[in-house]
Amino acid sequence: MTAVEVEPAAPAAPATREPVSGRSGRWWVPWLFLAPALVLFLYFKFIPMGNALVMSFQNVQPFLGNQWVGQDNYVKVVTSDGFQQAAWHTVLLAVFQTAGSMLLGLVLALLMEGRSRRLSFIRSAAFLPVVVPMAVIAELWRIMYHPTGDGMLNSLLGLVGLEPSGFINDPHTSMASVIATGIWRGAPYDMMIFLAGLAGVNRDLYEAAIVDGASRWRRLLHVTLPGLRSVFSILFILAAIRGLRVFTEVYLLTNGGPNGSTEVVMTLITKLGLEQNRLGVASAGAVLLFLATLLLTVVVSVLRRRERE
């Protein structure tokens, strides 16, 4: 008999595991956690925004039916003297509050930069205006703005020989008083963002500037400020949007008075919609304010992108 030669079996190929795609598996788990927040945003924010857009083209008549009027509401808003004055006040308040809060926030950040425990306590104390409700802040400033001679701020003015001021009760000083309150509230928030930005500035540049004999002012001008360029752009967007949408402090301090000297777009929209029941015109004003805010955000974002490129 002849022996049959048996060829050795080839080694088995190792089992390969198919790569797991990011879309496979339980992709719905993150959306499940986000669902409650998305439902709340949809019901309380996006649906009302859509309704406001539709109402801006209608003559809203509760219980009687709405009538389509096209762009008439927008024409009334744009050509209204009250809206133009409120828009100018809004821009004025946004510009000065943005510039003032950023400047004061930068100064506070430069003064409080460091890792000392005392500085941590001071930073926490300086940040308190941000976490205090705006209603409380407005009431405190209303007390300090008391127009009589024995008011808090008027007493301080009397110590340096100045006449008492009417502050929020005087049409000539009411806007400046509201701006000062907004700066006092917004500067600590800007300070914390500036502190985070200062921590990212390259320290080697400071050492090289010191070796070259640069003064503190030159180090601030040529090292610190260029290193905070991205922080400035972010804060400008946030502060400008906050200024354009200002409402609470104006409503609580002056409600647009006296004689309309502090009337802004948000307070005017509130009066048109809730007091005068002109919901269509108020919705048109709200849409215009939203478009202005969106345009400002897009323009600044495009400029930042071009600067990076």
Image: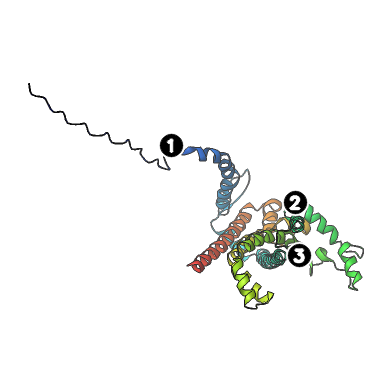
Dot 1 or dot 3, earlier in sequence: 1
Mark 2–mark 3 distance (CA, rounded to whole Å): 17 Å
* Residue type, mark 2 in image: Pro
Image coordinates for residue 142, horizontal then vertical, percent: 82, 58
* Number of other residues with Cα within 10 Å of mark 1, as a class: few under 14, some 14 to 19, many 20 or more: few
In the image, is 170 to the left or to the right of 210? right
Identify whether 250 is placed above or below 88.
Answer: above
Q: Residue 25 carries which label?
A: 1
Q: Disc 3 marks which residue?
A: 180
Q: Considering the image in quadrants, where does the N terminus appear?
A: top left
Q: Nearer the viewer, residue 101 or 109?
A: 109
* Residue type, mark 3 in image: Ala
- Judged from this view, the residue extending furthest toward the bottom is 213
Asked which secondary structure carries label 1, the reply is loop
**How many numbered markers are drawn?**
3
Mark 1–mark 3 distance (CA, rounded to whole Å): 55 Å
* Number of other residues with Cα within 10 Å of mark 3, as a class: few under 14, some 14 to 19, many 20 or more: some
In the image, is 112 to the left or to the right of 44? right
Asked which secondary structure carries label 2, the reply is loop
Q: Disc 2 marks which residue?
A: 133
* Residue type, mark 1 in image: Gly
Image coordinates for residue 21, horizontal then vertical, percent: 40, 42
* Number of other residues with Cα within 10 Å of mark 2, as a class: few under 14, some 14 to 19, many 20 or more: few
Q: Nearer the viewer, residue 87 or 274?
A: 87
Task: Please tell me which residue is depicted at 55% across the width and 65% down the height of the picture.
Answer: 300
Q: Which mark is residue 49?
A: none
Task: Please tell me which residue is depicted at 56% across the width and 61% down the height of the picture.
Answer: 297
Instruction: Say if residue 177 shows up in the picture.
Output: yes
- Judged from this view, the residue extending furthest toward the top is 1
